[in-house]
Amino acid sequence: MRAAVAQLVRFGWIETQCCLFAIAIFLGLAVSRSVPLPIPRYDALLAYGILITAVFFVLRLETAREVAVIVAFHALGLALELFKVRVGSWSYPEDAWTKIAGVPLYSGFMYAAVGSYICQAFRRFDLRVNRFPWLPAVILAAAAYANFFSHHWLPDLRVLIAIGFVIVLWRSRVGFTVGQQRYAMPLSLSFVLIGFFLWVAENGATWLGAWQYPDQADFWQLVHVGKWGSWALLVSLSFVLVAAVKLGEGRFYSSPPHQVHGSAHQRDDREHANSHDDHPIDDRRQLATDPCPDLRAQDRADGQGQHDGPVDLGDDHEDDPGDRVGDHHQHVLEPVDPGHALGQRDAHDGHHQHALGGAEIAAVHAGEDNRGEQPGRPDRRHVTGTESLPTGGDLPCQPRSDDHQHAAETDQHRHDRLER
């Protein structure tokens, strides 16, 4: 229960941050209503709206693209305002220098606040959408905007348009993050909920005298609840516009809905699981953590073909095919120098060593006296490579020196047996 309450508080705090632009507008409405101003109130609100837009951009609360979206919302809202005021849907009773056809220019910031909220929500909630039907959604959004104008002469289609949105968005889900948890909900439901809170905000704006409806001319009263549906349609239109921007930024689509719920870290791991190919430096860093990657690879290769021990190849392979026992002035068998054999192999492998590979240690000659050496430690006097090893302490790696010593002793024993 306590965890659920904590998540609800976090959700409310993120929502408050998403509404910063709208809160600033409401603050301006409240202050301008109670504080005497040297210029008309609507003109002061226009200057104030431009100022907070610039401040949000300077403080990086809004990106350049998001400011462009806010300007587009301002223009679309102003066009709608010019028409609605002309047909008498609502009015702006106060005087102003920046009024055009009875509409103060600041009125567009009411719609800009909606666009700012959606932009902020995409970033702060890390919104992602799946199964979004672009073509039907764009058509319905255009129809919703056109219906705001046409329903004054033609049948009002807002109910049919709303049903259309529910149908085409039936499978669409929007994912969002609260704290460390990831959630998802139907996209159309989010439009309805946001529309409700916009209707509540509209009541507050009309009470502060931002504009008034005909039935509010004599005294203030609640805005008709039918406006809730109109705001939900406006949110649908606004979402499509912002979604087009987020699609261009690559921040729109999400994973399938059955993978959405879970921790935010798990979701990030899934989203970035296929990004390792774009960062080869990660692979090089991983190799760097192993001081002897070539030796590890050699061990794995040797382990697939043998069991870390000498193999009896039979009598046929023990004779030297070049010299017979009866030949004079010939050494029938030469002492086996495992260091020489390993040196040849190292010379061949040196062309293929990884750049991050460590120094390699040559095997100790089987005939040399190892007195004074600790058991299991290679002789530090035989070192190859470009880097010298430390004279004290443990070596960074031991390339199977025990196996090489064992092989050398076996060859020496075989040589002694033949000489006897």
Image (cartoon, rainbow, N blue to C red):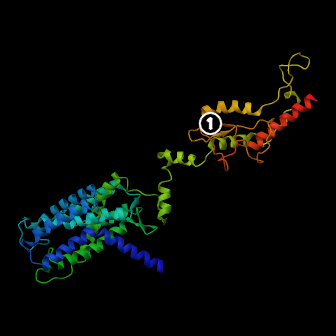
- State the residue lying farthest toward the right: 420
Viewer-side residue, 161 vs 186: 186
> In the visual, does 45 lie left or right of 322?
left
Work out whether residue 407 or residue 232 is closer to the camera in this orientation and state it: 407
Residue 367 is situated, as x and y percent measured from the top left of the image, at: 81, 35
- On the image, which quarter does residue 10 sit in? bottom left
Q: How many marks?
A: 1
Q: Which residue is mark 1?
A: 385
Q: Residue at x 43, y 58 (%)?
A: 254
In the rendered image, the vertical position of residue 148 relative to residue 402, given as above or below = below
- Where residue 289 sits in the image (x, y, percent)? 58, 49
Q: Residue at the bottom extreme?
A: 219
Q: Residue furthest front?
A: 372
Q: Position of residue 400 (x, y in %)?
A: 73, 43
Vertical placement of residue 95 versus 288, above or below: below
Report the residue that reaches farthest toward the top.
328
- How crowded is the residue under tag 1: few (<14 C-alpha within 10 Å), some, or many (20+)? some
- Residue 29, position as x, y percentages in the image: 17, 74
Q: Is residue 25 visible?
A: yes
The kind of residue on which mark 1 rests is Gly
For residue 33, above or below residue 191 = below
Measuring 39% from the left and 76% from the top, which residue is drawn there?
A: 9
Q: Quadrant of residue 162?
A: bottom left
Relative to 410, 4 lies left or right: left
Q: Which residue does the image show at 19% across and 75% down from the upper left?
A: 205
Which quadrant would the C terminus be assigned to in this image? top right
Instruction: Determine which quarter of the picture holds residue 133.
Output: bottom left
Element at label 1: loop
Asked if one can make out residue 226 in the rendered structure from this viewpoint, the answer is no
Does 42 sit left or right of 16 as displayed? left
